[in-house]
Amino acid sequence: MDALWQDILARPAIYAGAICTLGLMTLIYRENAVYRFFEHVFIGLAAGFSIVVLIKEILDPFLYQPVFKKGEWYWTFVFMFGLLFYFIHSRKYNWLSRLPIGFLMGFSAGQAFQGFANTYLPQLARSFRPLFVTTPDGSWDAAAGINNLIFMIVLVTVMSYFFFSFEQKSRVIRNSAQFGRWVMMVAFGAIFGTTIMARMALLFDRMYFLFSDWLRLVR
């Protein structure tokens, strides 16, 4: 028993991590008070960590350092503008909170549109692929041509599945839409499998922590 307490005192962070891991894993059995307790502990630690990150990564480099160290006093107006958010708790002056909210929503909408354009417009341009691809010596690259043909077939059939503006009476359109549906199901299955593998990777990491760092059974 004395050896156990000496080990706990020598490695308190390891034992704390092991207890938290086992407490969260009790959810495998069912929802219980132990799991909820460690869930709240995790949420509290995350909230505290976010406050520290806010101070170190935002307030200090973008407010304290420019204003008090570099003399860039105009940053105080940005800080005061951000304080208008707190007027949302006032019944009389809550309209002031709409100013930064509207500004932030407009700025976020502009960033979202820019991200959409930078992400999807190049993909639309790359969707038009040539079926006749030549190698550097001028001969036909059969592998690249077949790959582009398969890509175009998949693209057209998947798009035909989303033709909801009219009734799909044509047998060709119905079969194309059905094939596109099966292709999407395969893609969704692959995405689901990737998600499961990510969860398994997290589980393996925790199990390795328990058996290696805590119990020292694996080296």
Image (spheres, rainbow, N blue to C red):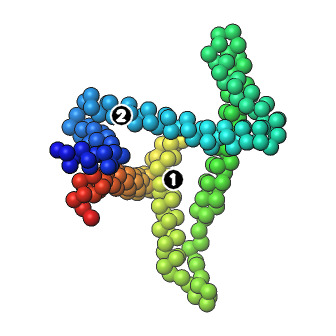
Horizontally, is 108 left or right of 25 in the view? right
Front-lying residue, 8 or 191: 8
Nearest the viewer among 105 and 186 is 105
Q: Residues within 10 Å of mark 1 (few under 14, many from 20)?
A: some
Q: Say which quarter of the image contains residue 204.
A: bottom left
Where residue 135 appears, x then y in whole percent? Answer: 59, 84
Mark 2, residue position: 39
Q: Is residue 84 above or below residue 206?
A: above
What element does badge 2 sit on? helix
Say if residue 196 shows up in the picture: no
Q: CA distance from mark 2 to mark 1?
A: 43 Å
Tags 2 and 1 in contact by the CB under 8 Å rule?
no
The answer to whether 139 is drawn above or below residue 88 in the figure is below
Tell me which residue sits at (72%, 38%) in the image: 64
Q: What secondary structure is marked by label 1?
A: helix
Residue 99 percent coordinates (x, y): 73, 25
Q: Position of residue 59 (x, y in %)?
A: 66, 37
Residue found at x 66% / y 54%: 118
Q: Nearer the viewer, residue 45 or 200?
A: 45
Residues packed near mark 2 inside 10 Å, few (<14), some (14 to 19) or many (20 plus): some
Q: Is residue 96 above or below residue 118?
A: above
Look at mark 1 in the image and give the residue it sits on. 159
